[in-house]
């Protein structure tokens, strides 16, 4: 009986996680390059119940303890392209990532709303430099062009070529805010990726689906709460009515 | 549960900031040489789902992680060009390029502007913006009629005996990264740490821009785009508010669990 009470509580906790992740998805409806996340729920590994009161001890069967979060999965489908007309806004079509130089090593992003730092380098909104194939790209001013193949030119001279990365299995990517971290050696050169200057990739949040997630989370939470109440009532009867002589 | 409140509160705050920026842009649609602001959003850090005390299946990497919400990650000026508006006043100049005029502010600080509505102060100095003298200083002697600014920046007028007199030449300044200039109001900018050092040039020089007399630069605000931003911000705000209401309803359920 008490196990059931804890199972109901864990069900409520699980729906909280769904609410958190859905809230985060909705919060990023207008964040460039955002990729929506999803919660994968599972039952806890089934445990074997034993009958211990009477010899011989025998197995009664299996029982799934409760529900839990198995994984959070990122949906890597591309978001819609939005024209901004700003030279420092870049978007990628196809499966590829901009490479960013950070203190913790290379990071990867599709958040292409860049700017130019005090030393003339192209940087992300967080101030980290965008890497070209031969180091950071020093564009100096906003009068630079980026061709579809990633070659950056300023006043006719080539500044460098964007280092675009791709991954055989996107599941190795780990989200760190707007950046993705990847295990060393996992990044390969991107093929079939086109760079668009003056565009941003919007978030890939499917708003209607995420609203449905919200409704499901709320109702599942309510159902688990009701379950906890029923258990509470049963426990109440067990403690007050069992064995009462009328 | 508190995480959901924080995430949605951040979403509401961010969208509110976007509305504020759009409102500021729209209210400056008729401001000479106003450059629109643009706000970008980014993600807050991710943390382990298990850290919140939530049920997570025994760790099989990668560990489940959840995002902490959204933040406004930077307000930048879009220094892009704007249409020119003819005023017919010969002392009005629009800069057809990225150059800016340097003005001497009241505290001796050099400020930069693209507002080229030039005029003379009581002592004959050429001033712009809120009445700050143009740098380097150009002084027009008294009694000069028909002061004009030529496309190469030369300031000239009709002196005594109907002789054309030249008083000096305007200089233009440009920055490697004009988007990082700090707006200080009244169409003036201060060089911010990211803007780079001002580079001096003359009007008409490549990369600075020629002057067009009798015109002023309009604001580069696109009303249709700002309206689209407002609509998107309102809807996004509603999504955040709805998710917040769900979190509230869940909390209500939790605290009435024991009746």
Image: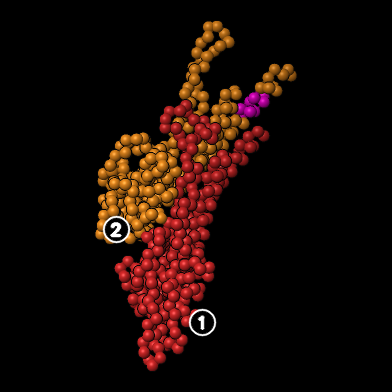
Chain colours: A orange, B red
Seen from this angle, which residue lies furthest bottom?
B161
Q: Is residue B107 visible?
A: yes
x 48%, y 32%: residue: A69
Against A64, residue B91 (above or below) is below
Residue B166 position within the rendered picture, expressed as x and y whole percent measured from the top left = 37, 82
Residue B234 position within the rendered picture, expressed as x and y whole percent measured from the top left = 50, 56
x 43%, y 49%: residue: A126
Q: State yes or no: residue B44 in magenta.
A: no
Which secondary structure class fits the magenta region best?
helix
A116 left or right, relative to B206: right
Against A82, residue B28 (above or below) is below
Seen from this angle, which residue lies furthest top?
A55
Q: Secondary structure at mark 2?
A: strand
Residue indicated by mark 1: B122
Q: State yes or no: residue A231 in magenta.
A: yes
x 43%, y 56%: residue: B194
Against A211, residue B190 (above or below) is below
Q: Which residues are magenta?
A: A230-237
In depth, the one of B27 and B106 nearer the eye is B106
Q: Secondary structure at mark 1?
A: loop
Give how far apart the Cα atoms at labels 1 and 2 are.
Answer: 45 Å
The quarter in which the C terminus of chain B is drawn is top right
Name the chain under label 1. Answer: B
x 60%, y 38%: residue: B253
Disc on res. A154: 2
Disc on res. B180: none
């Amino acid at each position: 009986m008490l196990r059931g009470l804890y199972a109901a509580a864990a069900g409520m906790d699980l729906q909280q996680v769904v609410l958190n992740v859905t809230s985060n998805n909705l919060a990023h409806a207008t964040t460039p390059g955002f990729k929506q996340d999803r919660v994968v729920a599972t039952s806890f590994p089934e445990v074997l119940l034993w009958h211990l009161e009477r010899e011989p001890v025998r197995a009664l069967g299996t029982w799934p303890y409760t529900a839990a979060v198995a994984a959070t999965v990122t949906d890597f489908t591309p978001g819609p392209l939005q024209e901004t007309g700003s030279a420092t806004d870049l978007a990628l079509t196809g499966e590829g990532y901009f490479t960013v130089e950070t203190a913790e090593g290379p990071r990867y992003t599709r958040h292409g709303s860049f700017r130019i730092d005090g030393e003339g380098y192209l940087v992300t909104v967080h101030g980290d430099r965008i890497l070209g194939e031969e180091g950071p790209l020093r564009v100096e001013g906003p009068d630079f062009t980026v061709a579809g193949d990633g070659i950056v030119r300023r006043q006719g001279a080539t500044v460098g070529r964007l280092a675009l990365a791709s991954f055989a299995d996107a599941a190795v990517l780990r989200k760190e805010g707007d950046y993705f971290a990847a295990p060393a050696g996992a990044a390969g050169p991107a093929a079939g990726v086109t760079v668009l200057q003056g565009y941003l990739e919007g978030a890939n949040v499917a708003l209607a689906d995420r609203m449905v997630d919200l409704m499901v989370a709320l109702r599942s939470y309510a159902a688990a709460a009701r379950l906890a109440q029923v258990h509470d009532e049963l426990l109440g009867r067990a403690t007050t009515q069992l064995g009462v002589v009328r | 549960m508190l995480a959901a409140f924080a995430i949605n509160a951040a979403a509401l705050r961010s969208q509110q900031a976007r509305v504020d920026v759009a409102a500021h842009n729209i209210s400056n649609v008729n401001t000479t040489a106003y450059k629109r602001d643009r706000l970008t959003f980014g993600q807050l850090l991710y943390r382990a789902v298990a850290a919140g005390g939530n049920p997570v299946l025994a760790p099989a990497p990668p560990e489940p992680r959840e995002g902490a919400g959204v933040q406004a990650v930077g307000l930048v000026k879009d220094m892009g060009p704007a249409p020119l508006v003819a005023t017919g006043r010969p002392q009005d100049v629009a800069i057809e390029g990225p150059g800016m005029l340097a003005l001497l502010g009241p505290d001796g600080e050099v400020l930069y502007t693209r507002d080229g509505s030039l005029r003379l102060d009581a002592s004959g100095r050429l001033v712009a913006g809120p009445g700050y003298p143009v740098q380097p200083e150009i002084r027009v002697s008294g009694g000069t009629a028909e002061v004009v600014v030529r496309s190469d920046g030369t300031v000239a007028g009709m002196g005594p005996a109907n002789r054309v007199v030249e008083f000096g030449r305007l200089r233009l300044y440009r920055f490697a990264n004009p988007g990082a200039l700090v707006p200080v109001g009244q169409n003036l900018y201060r060089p911010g740490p990211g803007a780079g050092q001002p580079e001096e040039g003359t009007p008409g020089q490549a990369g600075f821009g020629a002057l067009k007399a009798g015109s002023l630069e309009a604001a580069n605000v696109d009303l249709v785009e700002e309206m689209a931003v407002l609509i998107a911000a309102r809807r996004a705000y509603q999504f955040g508010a709805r998710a917040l209401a769900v979190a509230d309803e869940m909390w209500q359920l939790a605290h009435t669990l024991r009746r």
